[in-house]
Image (tube, rainbow, N blue to C red):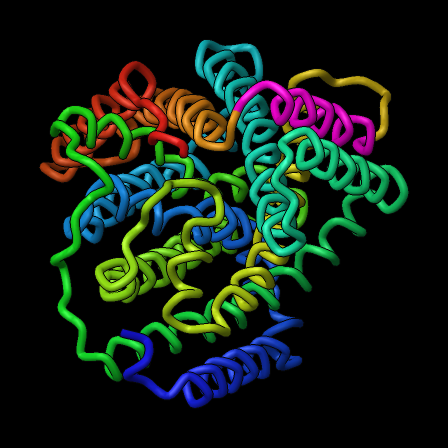
Amino acid sequence: MSSTINLNYMNLTAIVAMFVVGFILVQKKLIKSEQWGATVTPLASIIGSGFLIVAPLLHSVFGKWALVGILILLILGYGIGSVIRFNIENAEIYLLNNPNGYTAKLEKLSQVALGISYAISVAFYISLFTSFISKELNIVNSQTMNWMTTGTLLSIMGISWWRGTRGLEKIELIAVTIKLAVIGGVLFSLANYAYQTQSAWFEHDAIRKFSILEKLSMLAGMLMITQGFETTRFMGERYESRVRVKAARNSQLIAMCIYLLFIGLTCPIFLNFPIVQLNETAVSVSLGRAISILPILLLGAAIASQLSAALADTLGGGGLLKEIIPSKLKINTYYMMIIAVAIFLIWTANIFEIINFSSKGFALYFLLQTIIAFKFIRMKVVGIKKYFVIMGCALLQIALVFVILCSIPAPHS
């Protein structure tokens, strides 16, 4: 199919689109904006969580229904985000003034679950980062890849110890800017391909037949793809609640647009170049067969997105650990604890198992947050709206219990 299009034109327009988006993102007004600064960390985590892996995961499991799958995940994620934003506005001050109550104990327990989840997600990000680089270097030995991943994590550990929070945040901002510019080029290229080839939409099959329950269980195992917005709960020292609530909402809305466009626009490519084996770099293989520049752009996205997401969750996880285990130790020490757990995981599980473990951990955190929210819904919400909010919260809890108990990893090739 790719022979029917002008590859040079496709490659050139992708690069131009990437630089246009990059130019917009480096404008001084945006970089200096407090609101954008607050949005960068949650956005880095959300997009890093799933941009490179979400397309092959959903297309291989759901086939032509992949767009429905991501829509379900995004709606669930946005609903959970609403709970987090509600708790920022209503629970934080109460918890600060009542540190020994039942609600505070629930909050502490939820933070333990989240801290573990952050460590798991850092392992996922850097494993994916290494997989893309290994593919370009034709490295297939799993031991070699694990050592590369370990080396990258140790480098982050060194930066954490040497530069602390400020050093991590500076690298994160640069990485997010590069990542969004690359994503702009990728999305424009995919739209151009769909227009040039006039390929059919929503006709491709999954890699094999799965039952409805299997599909839902695998979808549940992908919940961590939507996480990241919760990092705003732990940015109170730098930003007031109003800014953090808006940052959480904005990061989710931007991510939702990117995910929907990416899954939709990859439909023609996965029809013409089906996924044969589901692995970490399947998206690069299929998209590269259609548009030759895309593997290079995706490599850039892998480096920027996984590094920025790993840094975001290292920051979040380290800050959480310091709250859970208060001591006179520097915050840098807590960052290294998160990375040590991540190193352990990359030697004991494959990437899709790590995604599933992480999803369960985040689901537990979100479930505990919905329980905390119930207390304040009864106190703060009035009228008939209260019953709709309680019903929505209860539905979220059912979904999260399903993730914890029933989620399974997608089949790894």
Position of 155 with respect to 214 (left or right) is right
Where does residue 347 sit, x and y in percent of width and height?
64, 22
Q: Main secondary structure of the magenta part?
A: helix
**Is residue 99 visible from the viewing direction of this image?**
yes
Quadrant of residue 176 within the rendered picture: bottom right
Where does residue 284 sit, x and y in percent of width and height?
46, 57
**Quadrant the C terminus occupies:** top left
Q: How many marks?
A: 0
Q: Which residues are magenta?
A: 331-349
Position of 263 with respect to 147 (left or right) is left
Quadrant of residue 270 within the rendered picture: bottom left
Q: Residue at x 37, y 47 (%)?
A: 54
Residue 72 included in the magenta stretch of the image: no
Position of 405 with respect to 241 (left or right) is left
Q: Is residue 63 above or below residue 187?
A: above
Where does residue 29 sit, x and y in percent of width and height?
62, 79
**Is residue 245 visible from the viewing direction of this image?**
no
Q: Residue at x 44, y 53 (%)?
A: 51
Q: Is residue 306 above or below residue 201?
A: above
Q: Is residue 269 above or below residue 210?
A: below
Instruction: Return the residue found at the far right.
Output: 162
Q: Residue at x 85, y 29 (%)?
A: 330
